[in-house]
Structure formats: C-alpha cells, structure tokens
Amino acid sequence: MEILVCIKQVPDDSVEIHLKSDGTPNLDGVTKVANAFDTYALEMATRLKEAVGGEITVVSIGEDSVRDALKNCLAVGAEHAYQITDAAFDGSDSMAKAELLAKAKAKLEKDNGKPFDLIFCGFEATDRASGQTGAQLAAVLNAPLITSLVDISSKDGKIVAKQETDFGYNSIEAATPCVVTVSKPEYDPRYPTIKNKLKAKKMPIGAFAAADLGVDASKVGQGAALTHTVSFSEPAQKEGGVKINEKDQEEGARKLVAMMVEAKAL
Amino acid sequence: MAYLISDEGAELLESVKEFCKNEVQEQCKEYDRSGEWPKAIYDKAIEMQLHSLEVPEEFGGPGLDRVSIAALIEQMAMADAGFATTISASGLGMKPVLIGGNEAQKKRACEIILKGGFGAFGLTEPGAGSDPAAGKTVAVKDGDSYVLNGRKCFITNGGIADFYCVTALTDKSKGVKGMSMFYIEKGTKGLSTGHEEDKMGIRTSNTCDVVMEDCRIPAENLLGEEGKGFGIAMKTLDQARTWMGCVSAGIAQRAMDEAIAYGKQRIQFGKPVLKNQALQFKIADMAIKIETARQMVSYALTLMDKGLPHTKESAIAKCYASDIAMECASEAIQIFGGYGYSREYPVEKLLRDAKIFQIFEGTNEVQRIVVARDTIGRY
C-alpha cells in the first residue's frame, strides 16, 4: 500500500503561548515540533504499512525547519520525505495548502509511477486548530474522506476505518484512494530507535518549489487567501475551583449536584 | 555548558530527552517508593535501543563516540539515576568480554544485548569489597568444563541480567594472580540470584546476590586466560568508573535545575529567594562543580576513545563527580528549605541516589588511593 502522510510543524503545544502587544502570538524561543495529530497519523500509517506492506511518503509545507520534523518522520516509519517550500507559499490559507499538497501528490505519483492509495492527515493542527486542510485536500482530489480515525486496517482491498464520534465509534469501509484524518488513537507514536534515528539523518529529503509543482504563484500565498485571521485571543483564565471535601463520596456527589443545579449547569 | 558532542549525538539527545521526560522522570517517583524494578520502562528503553549504546559498531552497535553517549546517559541520570545505572551497568557487564574475550565471546554478548538483554558484572563478595583479592569464589577445571562455587553480592542487574561476567579463583595459592574471569549465561544450572537489597537510593535499579552452586560452564566460557581475571576486572572498572561519574554529574545537574526553578518561584520577604546573593553563590558553586565534573568525565572518555591510559583520570572523574553530586543534592535541599526534606519534593531523592556513587565501583577512598599511587609513583 502506498501511503502519503501530510505533516505540519507547529509551536510546541506543551508551552503556554501569550499574545504580543500587536495581538499576535509570541512564539519567541518556542520550539517547533511536528503536530501531535500528524504524528498519530504517521504512527497509524506505519502500523498499517507493517501489516500489509508498502511505503510511506511524508510531505510538509514550510521553511527549512520542517526538515527536522521530516527527518524525525524518517526515523519512525516513513521511507521518503519531501519539503514543499517557496517564498510564494508564505501566508497561504488551508485551501491553498490543500492545493499544494494535491500538486505534490500528483508530482510524486508521476515521478514514481505509483499512485497513492491512502492520504493521512491529522484531524487538526494544534496551533490554529481549524481542521480544514484534510477535508479540503479530499475535496481538491475529489476523493472520499473519513475523519477522526482512531484505527485503520485493510481487508479485501478495502480499508476499514474506526471513526470516533461523540457517541462511540463508526466502522467505515472505503475503497482506495481515499483521504483520512486522524484523531488520538489508543496507542502513542513510537520513539525512534537509536539506529533508525542515525539512519534517518543520512536519508535524503526532497524539496518542491512552485515551479516544480506547476503552481501559479498568484493562486497561493497571502494575497490569494480566501480566509483571513482577524484577531487572536487568549483563553480566559481559569478561576480557582471549589474543593468539595465531604465525609464520603455519596455526600460529596450530593453537594456537587446541588451546586451544579444552583449554578444552573444542570 | 554541556558535552561537546557529534551531530548524531545531538539529534539522539533530543529523542532521549523527550523519552526521559515522557516515560521516566515522573514514573520513577512511584517506583522509588515501591522499590519495584520498573520493567515496563526498561522495555520501552530497550525498544528504543538505549541499553545498547555501548555495543561497538563492529558488533552491531550504533558507533557513537563515548562523549556523545555520556550526554545521553547524563540525560537519563537527570530523569532517574537508578534508570541510568541499570543502563550503564549493562555496559559494565559487557566490558570484561570486550576487554578479555575472544571474537566469538564478544559477538555472543553483544548479540544478547542487541536482542534486548542486560549484562551484569560480579566481582564483589561478602568478604571482598574494597579488597577484591579476598574473594572466595572458586572455579575448578573438570574436563571441558569449569565448576564454579561462591557468592557474589551487591551485583547491579543481578536479578535481571541475561549474562554475567564473574571472577573466580582458579588457583587459590596465587592470590589475585590465580583469579580468572568467566562468562555465564542466565539459566545455567547452579546459577541463581539470592538476597535482593532494599536500597536507600537508585531504587529503580536491581541489586542482589548472585550465587553459584556447582555451576558447570563450558571451559570456553573462560574470558582470556586463567590468572588474568583480576587484570580484566581492574580494566573493566577503570572504564566503568567514568560512567558512574557521568551519572553523578546528571544527578548534580538535576539538583541544580530543581534548586533554580524553586528558588525563582519561592517568595520570602517579598521577593524570590534566589534574589539573595547567598543562594546565588550556592548555585554558582554548583555550576562550577558540575561543569568541572562533566569536563573530567569527558576527558577520561576521550582518552578511552583514543586508546590512551585513563586509570587516574577515570578515578578522578568518578570520585569528584560523586562527591559533588552529594554536595549539590544537599545544597538543593537547603535551598528548598523544609520542603526539600519532604518526599513530596524531588530533591531528597537526589541525595539518596547520589550516595551510592561515592561507594560502588570502588569507594572514593579507593579512588584516592588510585590517584595518589598514579600521581606520586613508586618510591
């Protein structure tokens, strides 16, 4: 099975980010890491590849720092990695990024003579959390889309996806090619082994610019963006909680419910 | 400052840092209380190949320079010294084979490690600590076999190792010149583990007696020649000691990091306590000592990489780093005040962990004998 995994580099989500005086996020000194949901997508793709065979290619749009994220991907399951980079891409919105990913996919398929069966994306990125790119990529490719996967397997030439919903799980079968977006599975992404990490350091990472992809520069970048971020705001500060310290659990629960009723939460 | 390491080492350091942060540091707190050997953590470390860093490249290891490995081991030690000790002691168990063994023996031991096994080194006996020549374990040649009898004690990884390198007397009349080194695999009849120590610190590492009762091993399991065991053991310790200095530096670094973090947020007299120069000087002294220890470790390891003599430097590194680990842990507790004495805070554990490094792999008094002998010379 030929698998494409789309990776985004984001500011370390374990760091508390504040706004600068101009209202934009202060990212000074914040390490960039691969988006957590993308790492889940890669782990899920790797497990599928290990079960059914095939190869994984990872792609990422961004400046040279994304090469670090791509190198890490090569150490934990991917065979090939490509950076999509061009000054013309700066400020692209998710729709333009979906177009770029689709172009890169087409180029890789043409160069390698092998179509991708599955395209994995994280269901959202932990920085802007718009959750658009995967769905828009499916739309651009005119491919089926399954969102919020927590597991995937392959059966009789089809894929069987376990989709997480608010009420439980759906089991969805789909023909390939298709696009899937990945939520948090029950397992964690693997750590790179020492040897794989050292091996990945020596593996090549390709790069595609606008000209390589046949992209019309006027259709990407900030000027072509269909959506614009108007402003950022910090989450409201959490107020100190109330400690319920009753004699036993039953009394504690009783008091909790009473307080929730009083606050009109119930 | 830190170790000056290779690009490869720097990349691995990031992964090891993440692993230790996510899988080791917090988890080990509970194991420190229970004294249970945290198999689940070690299984993950093995999966990541952290236990095989010291396997030489020619036998399938990663081929890193020793200083780069030190940076990784230090990171592990900062998370939990017992964890780093287990990992490092496996390297210790492999060293007698690499120093005294033949190609087949080296290949065999390295294969076991690469497949996820651990090694252990057995020299100390109940009556033979700083005086290893007083060991009573014997090995009697019987046809194509040796039959070993004796008890080793305080053996790190003793209960969980897949192979052991132990010393035994093949000729009691010759003292240390009658001591030989043997390779024994787990499961050999007559080999068992005895009393497990309930230790003050490094509680995530396993320490126990290793007992040999009519333990018959193939004669080919002799490492080197008969009578060469003491020399192999001393060379083993010459190398291994620096690694204990490395772990010690990691404990000291953690102590300083914790002290700085706490000192910045603990408000007394309306300001963070670290605004007081008295405490800043404590931090400065810690930094001076830690960097000195680290660079001594680095120097001794570089000598090893170059195949140069390193007995004295290794002894200095181990002795100094473990002494300052105790000092830094103690001073960190002082900066934490009463909270530092509480098990709810992380620094009292560091003091308990640090103490053993002044004792094992040659007490610091023995290290000073080594340094004095090497410095003064024979007269």
Image (tube, coloured by chain):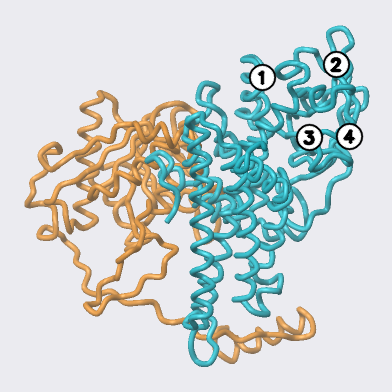
Front in this rendered view, residue A209 or A50: A209
2 or 4: tag closer to the N-terminus: 2
Q: Which mark is residue A149?
A: none
3 or 4: tag closer to the N-terminus: 3
Q: Residue B21 appears in which quarter of the rendering?
A: bottom right
Read off the residue under disc 4.
B151
Other-residue count near label 2 (Cα within 10 Å), few / some / many at <14 / 14–19 / ≥20: many
Front in this rendered view, residue B107 or B361: B361
In front: label 2 or label 3 = 3
Q: Is residue A129 above or below residue B49?
A: below
1 or 2: tag closer to the N-terminus: 1
- Residue at x 55%, y 32% (from the top left corner): B309
- Residue at x 86%, y 28% (from the top left corner): B191
* Residue closest to the far front: B379
Evaluate if marks 2 and 4 touch, with contact meaning CB atoms under 8 Å apart. Answer: no
- The answer for which chain carries disc 3 is B
Q: Residue A231 appears in which quarter of the rendering?
A: bottom left
Which image quarter is the C terminus of chain B in?
A: top right
What kind of element bears circle 4?
A: strand
Colour in which chain B is drawn: cyan
CA–CA distance in space, label 2 to label 3: 18 Å
Evaluate if marks 1 and 4 touch, with contact meaning CB atoms under 8 Å apart. Answer: no
CA–CA distance in space, label 2 to label 4: 16 Å
Three-letter amino acid code at the position of disc 3? Leu
Three-letter amino acid code at the position of disc 2? Tyr
Question: Are labels 3 and 4 assigned to the same chain?
Answer: yes
Q: Which mark is residue B123?
A: 3
